[in-house]
Structures are given as structure tokens and as C-alpha cells.
Image (tube, rainbow, N blue to C red):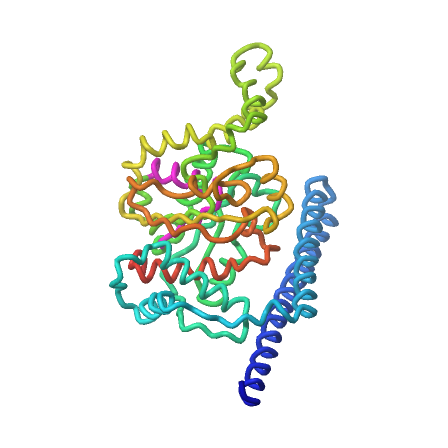
Amino acid sequence: MGVNDKFAKLTQYLSNYQGIRIKKRERLLKATEVSVNEIISRIEEVVDTPKPLQLVGLLKTLTNSGVWISRSMLHYLIATVDFSTPIKEKRESERVQYILDKIINNEDIQDPSVTEDEIFKTIYNELEFAHHNKNYNTELKVPKLDVTIVLVSGVLNEIFSTPAFERGAEHLQETLGIKFFSPKTKGTKGARTNVRLIEKQLLDYVANHKDEKLWLLAFSKGGIDCLHFLEKNKEFSNRHISGLSCIASPILGSNYTEHRILKLINKVHFLEGTKIYKMLEKEKDFLYKEIYQSLRAENQKKWFEKHHKNLPSKLFYTATAFEAAWYESHLWMILTKIFFKSAGANDGVVEADQAKFPEYFPAHNLGVIRGHHLVGTRSSMYSQEALLEAHLIYLSYKKLIS
């Protein structure tokens, strides 16, 4: 290698290092700005209405904002002192480049061995690299599709400050002008309750936005809730909804509900109707029976087999699963991996095989990508932006939405 080549390599090395550092700094600044504004707003609420509910809201905001800022600061500091991580050259195989070229030029892929999940992963990997490397410019163009995103979250969504993948949706709104909103659902309730909530809010929204088409982007159990909603509102869905994209959703239920401890706890429901049970039951959903029944693989698999033919036929359906090793996971996901051991690929909560549509249903399974179950939180360093952009490019390329 000559002197000029070494100089060029060093220049590229420093440029890449600086690009990643700037990217991390931008995320830290955004986390700080948004968090400070939220905290001030919450403090004003407490001052105006000094009640327990407002105080709980302030404490939740302080906790979630603190996590977001501290994690962003940590990643910025690591990017500043680590001179080894960012300087990987992007090398692609001829196969990957072939797929990218076809997508960029909007040409059909002639190779029959190229699968749908391979196409999606190729798009995602390209965008993910671009989002983490400020100086890398990808030729992929994210289309501005005529659709409004509906974010539907999953279990215990109330403990987070924002719905799952809202940060990614905000990015699409800022860069492409794509609207989004998130209907209020209950993270401690099953499909029956959340179907009613989704139904009312979507019907009200469409009544006030008649010209908009909706794209349901469902995370975790939100995917189950959406499937049940679509089945019960087939005519409405065919008219007003373009499609459903499930992310880390236990479409066929979760085998984790068969864990011996959970099964033991839920045996108490066999006493339903007895005096003892009624004495213990302070609310209708005792021990979260409704959500347990919704997530049981035995129940959801049977439901899908029975009702899949009644799902709206004019919609597209996609599914993306996550997989993470224990050391790649969020702290809570590490604990769930220890508690709920699984031989197959999983993200700490949902098994990858259960997060795919079955072969007998005409859907698009977009494969398993790296990520734990909580990558949709706003404090996550995961590139939500790349994931949602990859969906838009894939849907447009496959002509599933325009």
C-alpha cells in the first residue's frame, strides 16, 4: 500500500469516526431537549393540579427521561473514546449488491432464490448502516406514501412515556410528512377489551379524516389486538385500512404462558364462579385472566386457524420478528431470558416462530432481525428510523401500497 493509499484510508477512518460521533451527539441533544420540555410540562401540571395522578405522571416522566438521557450520554461517550468500533468498511457481496440495485432501479428481481425476508433484510441493513454512519449516503430512496400510521402497542405500554416505535414514526413525519397517531389501549387487558377501544377510536378518526388510508403498525400483543379488530370490522377495514404490519407480535400466541409458574398461578381461574373466587375477585379481570387467555398459544393458534379466512382480503399483512442473545438485551429482557428459557430464537419475550404468519395465510414474513423486545422504546439506541423506512421501501417496491 502506497503513501497516498494510506493517507486516503486514514482520512476515511477519521471521517467515519467523526460521523458516528456527531450522530450520537445529535441523539443526546434531542433526548435532552425533549426530556426537559416534558419535565417542565409535568411540573406545571402538578403545580396547577396537585393530585396523586399528576405526581405519578411526573415521577414516570422523570424516570423515563432520565433513562433516555443517561443512555444517550453513555453511547456518546463510548463513541468519543472508542476508535475501533466505527471504522468498519461497508463491504457487500455481489448478491446483496444485486438486490440493492434492483430495488434502487425499481426492477424485478429475476433470481428465484431471493426470498422476501432476504429482500427486506437487505433494505434494512443498508438503511441501518446509513443511520449509524452520518457520512455514508445510501442510494435507497424512502418513498412518501399516502398513508397515516396507526401505532398500536402491547402489554404494559402505560409504563413508557411514548407508544412503541413512536420515535421512528416521528422521524417519518419530520422527513416525509407522514402522519401518525396512537389509539389508547390497555396494556393489562386482553384482545376483547382492546378491540372495543381500537374500534371506537379508529371509527372516530376516519369520520373526521375521510380521505386518509390507515396503516396499522402493531407491536407485540398489539398485533393480536389488531387481528381481532380486523376480523370483527371486515367491511370498515377493507375500505379504510391499507394493511397491518406486526413487529415482534405473538401472532400465534406465546408458549411462555405454559411456563410452570404461570400455569400454577392461573389454575386459580378454575375456581371461577365459586364463593372463594368471587371474594378474591375485586375486579373483572382477576390476575389478568383476559390478557393471559389472549396470549396463550393454544387459544390464539386456534383462533387464527378458525378466523383467518374472515380477515379483510384487501389488506397486506407483514410480520417481522426479533432475535437477541442475552448479552444484547435490555436488563428486563435478560431477566426474562433467564426466567423463560427457550431453545428457539427469541427476543426475550416473543419466540420468533410464533411471530410469523403461518404458511396457509397469504402474508409477507419479513424474517428475523437482531433486536430485543424493547427496541421500540424511545430511549433505545436501536435504529427505529431504519426499521420503519425499510418497511416503506419494501411495501412500495412490492407494490403493496402507493
Q: Quadrant of residue 225?
A: top left
Residue at the far top in the pictured view? 275
Q: Nearer the viewer, residue 41 or 172?
A: 172
Q: Residue 353: give x, y in percent of width and height.
A: 42, 41
Q: Is residue 335 above or below residue 15?
A: above
At 29% from the left and 57% from the top, the residue drawn is 113
Q: Can the viewer see residue 222?
A: no
Q: Is residue 28 above or below residue 258?
A: below
User: In this image, 34 relative to 247: left or right?
Assistant: right
Q: Residue 44: give x, y in percent of width and height.
A: 71, 53
Q: Is residue 167 above or below residue 223?
A: below
Q: Nearer the viewer, residue 140 or 9?
A: 9
Taking the magenta stretch, the answer to whether it contains residue 180 is no
Q: Residue 19: give x, y in percent of width and height.
A: 58, 74
At 55% from the left and 67% from the top, the residue drawn is 132
Q: Is residue 74 above or below residue 234?
A: below
Number of marks in picture: 0
Q: Which residues are magenta?
A: 213-233
Q: Residue 30: give x, y in percent of width and height.
A: 63, 64
In the picture, the quarter occupied by the C terminus is bottom left
User: In this image, 293 relative to 98: left or right?
Assistant: right
Q: Can the viewer see residue 388?
A: yes
Taking the magenta stretch, the answer to whether it contains residue 231 is yes
Q: Quadrant of residue 167?
A: bottom right
